[in-house]
């Protein structure tokens, strides 16, 4: 229980626990090894002339790092990431041993510089290895939540190393430190092997569209084709120069203050321990919270802003009389603040930016930034510091001038980086084979007619003519021509279209009227659709929001859409409360209603925020690839208000329902009264929910004297599903609550006649059973019952006797059959190919193309089946895209399995056979 609470506090999902702690341990062991080498290097360098030796070490180390970075880049292209990571750690272990030999044998400045260069190389290699594996295992959303946590593993390790630095008194002690570092790297190698054994670590991404714009050809050699990588590399170079300068100033001023080596190391150890402990606390407890509240841009800009403030403060301190007593405190505070901010805030957030790239680009860009441009920044700082150490007067203040300039450059590049980051996210989730400027086209294939089109009439048609066109929208044979003519008439037809929308009750009619209005792209047509969005019928809101995608945004409508957004979030909160206690069947129905809420929220977002970003994000969250889903969520997180994003994320994420409820209660406030979802659905009816959800809710409803009158409207529903459930409730009332039943009949006498009519018209197989029949067939198994209910009206019940031919080979196929009772044999001449039983379906290809049947179907004994005709099914697919998507998915799965069987059956190549025979 405690572990679960702790994980929730840290933002760790249940399935992420083992992975997170493996990475934490891995980073802890790397941190111990690295800080011990760091301490050993600094002890030797600070012994003699650090003003000269530190810049020299920075320069030599930078050159070595750039060479190692190039070598790493080469092997990154040649080796798989798993093998590369293991070999890097092995190289680190060997290099640690070499440094131990240098410490034991070398006491010169050259040895000290070599040891510092060795430390930097080890730090670079461990950094590239750790973040390279992390960048592939975690997506952009996980990295935003977890990078601060997994990277905090090295903070307690470095604090421990800083404590050990206080205890170091000679070169013999340094050897013990390096021996301990050697063991730590060995432990990190074992942890890495455990991590690799439990995860697929492979640099593989979903295919993306080629960038239309990128860096110039001159810069592509150094930065690739991404403006994001360009700005990140330059900003990291500037930040590295600044942090190197601050570190140098801190060490040199401490050395001037404390001449005794033991006192110097004690002071340095104390400051470093405090720095790493503060960084750890901030990373673990506050980093995620701060990132959620401040956002990526502000977190990135905090570091260069701190440096600029520090530079200004330095200028002020130079004119204070007691400057000598304050300078050490100033340098200590600047170093501590910069290190905490860099390690706890900047580094994890900066690394998140790489996650917007594809996996291959991500690794290459990270290696380029860390293996070349960060060392380049350190080299520039080392050169400037080395050049100025002979000029004591200038060396007191000039470093702060160039550090301020570098900080200003970092601020500029980081500001641009954020914009490139958003562009890269959009590129990651945009359509692969379309242009960004592509205009949304009609889902029905309509186009705006022109005066040159045949049949275009310049005269204004009369009202009755337009009414006839509106009525023809429900006619299968005439609706396309009627729709095109109404679009051609434009604003002339709008008053009657608006009138029809106001009185229409059939969902199909509302959908087609809204589609026509969506293709009359005028302000008046937009106002009609906005009015439809505000009506209480949520289906009307859905189709109106889809039609509004054809229009530009209007800021004057923003308050209306914001009010509707809050309504949708409140409805989602109510549905979540219902899910927490609903039975299985009702839970599935409510989950579908939540999906509709998500779609409507995205439709509202398209009217409030940059539409191309929102459209790309909506496609991305529905994508099967986790990487694309994460990139889509990250887009939303950066362009919509934080509170709204948190609600939408709770709906989209796979989280326990209680966690989602807590999120909505925090955003909207807990409901004043308990939420009872069944009475809510019964009260709203088909105005707010699909007919399947209403029918399921009615079966779980327990009416009271104050609510029983709500049953009357459901008895008269146009949905057979709803009517059946309503009459079932009525019959249950007559048996279990006769007084309540009589009260209803007395108040509404027509109820008794409706009940008799229902019994007379009741079919052999109920509508609810028909939905279950569809749901239990492989063709529709993944389709929600709420969608399958739209197929019920076109299911024709047919019967066949023993030996009756259902269709013959060569007949034109226009129907799909689903067996309800009995068995059906499929024959090719005398050969029986297959037998279908209850729940099986056959003839499915006829739903998509009217080709001759490839076999004959014969009834084996009495058979009851359902027939779905092609024309009727086309209408359903046009109205409910989910049906078409699921049919295509199942047919693709069958085709894939058939291809796999054919590949297995193919004879092996002769070369392979000869190789095997020779083994």
Image: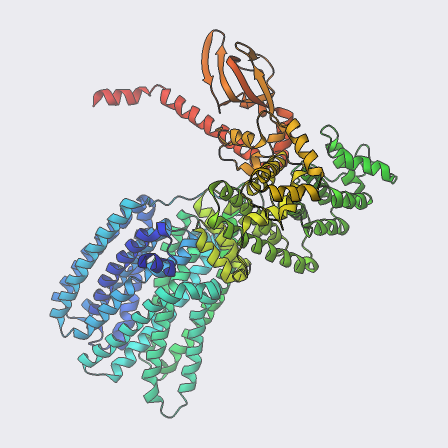
Residue 569 appears left or right of 362: right
Residue 224 appears left or right of 854: left
Foreground of the two, 491 or 657: 657
Q: Residue at x 16, y 66 (%)?
A: 177
Q: Residue furthest top?
A: 830
Q: Residue at x 45, y 9 (%)?
A: 831
Foreground of the two, 653 or 349: 653
Residue 97 appears left or right of 809: left
> What is the x, y in percent for residue 242?
38, 71
Look at the image and tell me whether residue 863 can be seen: yes
> What is the x, y in percent for residue 633?
49, 52
> What is the x, y in percent for residue 122?
25, 59
User: In the picture, residue 785 is in which quadrant?
Assistant: top right
Q: Is residue 690 above or below residue 334?
A: above
Name the quadrant of the C terminus: top left
Q: Is residue 27 above or below residue 208?
A: below
Foreground of the two, 666 or 98: 666
> What is the x, y in percent for residue 779?
50, 29
Q: Residue at x 71, y 38 (%)?
A: 750
Q: Residue furthest bottom?
A: 321
Residue 634 appears left or right of 66: right
Name the quadrant of the N terminus: bottom left
């Amino acid at each position: 229980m405690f572990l679960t609470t702790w994980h929730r506090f840290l933002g760790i999902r249940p399935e992420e626990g083992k992975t997170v702690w493996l990475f934490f341990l891995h980073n802890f062991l790397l941190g111990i090894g690295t800080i011990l080498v760091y301490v050993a290097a600094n002890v030797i360098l600070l012994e003699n002339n650090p003003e000269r030796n530190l810049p020299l070490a920075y320069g030599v180390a930078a050159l070595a790092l750039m060479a190692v970075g190039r070598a790493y880049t080469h092997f990154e292209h040649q080796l798989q990431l798993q093998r590369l990571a293991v070999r890097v750690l092995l190289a680190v272990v060997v290099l640690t041993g070499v440094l131990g030999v240098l410490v034991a044998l070398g006491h010169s400045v050259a040895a000290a510089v070599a040891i510092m260069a060795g430390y930097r190389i080890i730090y670079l290699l461990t950094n590239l290895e750790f973040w390279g594996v992390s960048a592939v295992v975690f997506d952009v959303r996980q990295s935003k939540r977890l990078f601060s946590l997994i990277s905090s593993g090295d903070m307690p390790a470095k604090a421990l190393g800083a404590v050990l630095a206080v205890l170091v008194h000679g070169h013999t002690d340094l050897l013990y430190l390096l021996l301990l570092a050697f063991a730590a790297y060995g432990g990190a190698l074992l942890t890495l092997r455990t991590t690799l054994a439990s995860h697929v670590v492979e640099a593989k991404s979903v295919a993306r569209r080629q960038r239309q714009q990128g860096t110039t050809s001159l810069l592509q050699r150094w930065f690739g084709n991404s403006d994001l990588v360009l700005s990140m590399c330059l900003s990291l170079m500037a930040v590295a120069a600044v942090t190197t300068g601050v570190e140098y100033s801190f060490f040199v001023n401490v050395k001037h203050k404390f001449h005794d080596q033991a006192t110097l190391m004690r002071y340095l150890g104390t400051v470093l321990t405090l720095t790493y402990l503060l960084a750890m606390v901030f990373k673990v407890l506050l980093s995620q919270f701060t990132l959620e509240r401040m956002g990526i841009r502000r977190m990135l800009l905090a570091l260069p802003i701190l440096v600029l403030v520090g530079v200004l403060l330095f200028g002020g301190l130079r004119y204070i009389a007691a400057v000598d007593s304050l300078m050490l405190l100033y340098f200590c505070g600047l170093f501590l603040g910069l290190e905490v901010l860099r390690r706890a805030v900047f580094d994890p957030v900066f690394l998140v930016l790489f996650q917007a790239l594809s996996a291959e680009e991500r690794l290459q860009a990270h290696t380029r930034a860390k293996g070349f441009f960060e060392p380049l920044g350190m080299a520039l700082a080392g050169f400037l510091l080395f050049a100025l150490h002979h000029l004591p007067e200038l060396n007191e203040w000039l470093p702060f001038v160039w550090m301020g300039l570098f900080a200003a450059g970092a601020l500029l590049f980081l500001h641009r980086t954020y914009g490139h980051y958003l562009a890269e996210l959009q590129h990651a989730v945009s359509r692969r084979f379309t242009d960004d400027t592509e205009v949304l086209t009609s889902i029905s294939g309509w186009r705006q007619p022109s005066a040159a089109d045949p049949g275009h009439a310049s005269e204004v048609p009369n009202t009755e003519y337009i009414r006839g066109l509106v009525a023809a929208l429900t006619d299968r044979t005439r609706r396309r021509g009627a729709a095109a003519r109404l679009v051609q008439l434009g604003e002339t037809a709008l008053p009657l279209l608006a009138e029809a929308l106001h009185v229409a009750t059939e969902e199909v009619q509302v959908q087609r009227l809204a589609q026509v209005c969506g293709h009359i792209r005028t302000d008046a047509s937009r106002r009609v659709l906005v009015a439809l969005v505000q009506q209480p019928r949520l289906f009307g809101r859905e189709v109106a929001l889809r039609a509004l995608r054809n229009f530009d945004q209007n800021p004057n409508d923003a308050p209306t859409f914001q009010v509707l957004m809050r309504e949708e979030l409140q409805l989602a909160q109510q549905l979540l409360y219902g899910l927490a206690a609903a039975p299985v069947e009702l839970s599935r129905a409510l989950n579908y209603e939540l999906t509709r809420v998500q779609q409507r929220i995205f439709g509202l977002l398209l009217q409030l925020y940059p539409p191309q970003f929102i459209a790309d994000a909506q496609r991305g969250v529905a994508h099967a690839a986790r990487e694309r889903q994460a990139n889509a969520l990250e887009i939303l997180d950066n362009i919509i208000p934080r509170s709204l994003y948190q609600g939408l994320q709770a709906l989209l994420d796979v989280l326990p329902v209680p966690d989602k409820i807590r999120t909505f209660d925090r955003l909207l406030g807990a409901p004043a009264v308990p939420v009872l979802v069944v009475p809510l659905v019964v009260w709203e009816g088909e105005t707010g929910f699909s007919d399947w959800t209403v029918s399921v809710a009615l079966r779980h409803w327990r009416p009271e004297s104050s609510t029983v009158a709500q049953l009357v409207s459901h008895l008269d529903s146009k949905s057979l599903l709803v009517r059946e459930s309503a009459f079932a409730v009525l019959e249950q009332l007559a048996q279990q609550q006769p007084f309540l039943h009589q009260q209803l009949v007395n108040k509404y006498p027509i109820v008794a006649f409706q009940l008799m009519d229902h019994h007379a018209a009741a079919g052999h197989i109920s509508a609810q059973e028909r939905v279950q029949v569809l749901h239990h067939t492989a063709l529709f198994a993944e389709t929600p019952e709420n969608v399958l209910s739209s197929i019920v009206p076109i299911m024709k019940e047919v019967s066949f006797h023993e030996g009756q031919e259902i269709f013959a080979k060569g007949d034109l196929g226009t129907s799909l059959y689903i067996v309800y009772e009995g068995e059906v044999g499929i024959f090719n001449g005398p050969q029986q190919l297959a037998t279908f039983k209850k729940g099986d379906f056959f003839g499915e290809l006829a739903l998509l193309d009217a080709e001759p049947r490839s076999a004959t179907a014969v009834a084996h004994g009495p058979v009851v089946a359902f027939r779905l005709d092609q024309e009727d099914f086309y209408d359903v697919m046009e109205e409910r895209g989910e049906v078409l998507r699921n049919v295509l998915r199942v047919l693709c799965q069958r085709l894939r399995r058939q291809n796999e069987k054919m590949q297995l059956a193919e004879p092996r190549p002769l070369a392979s056979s000869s190789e095997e025979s020779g083994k």
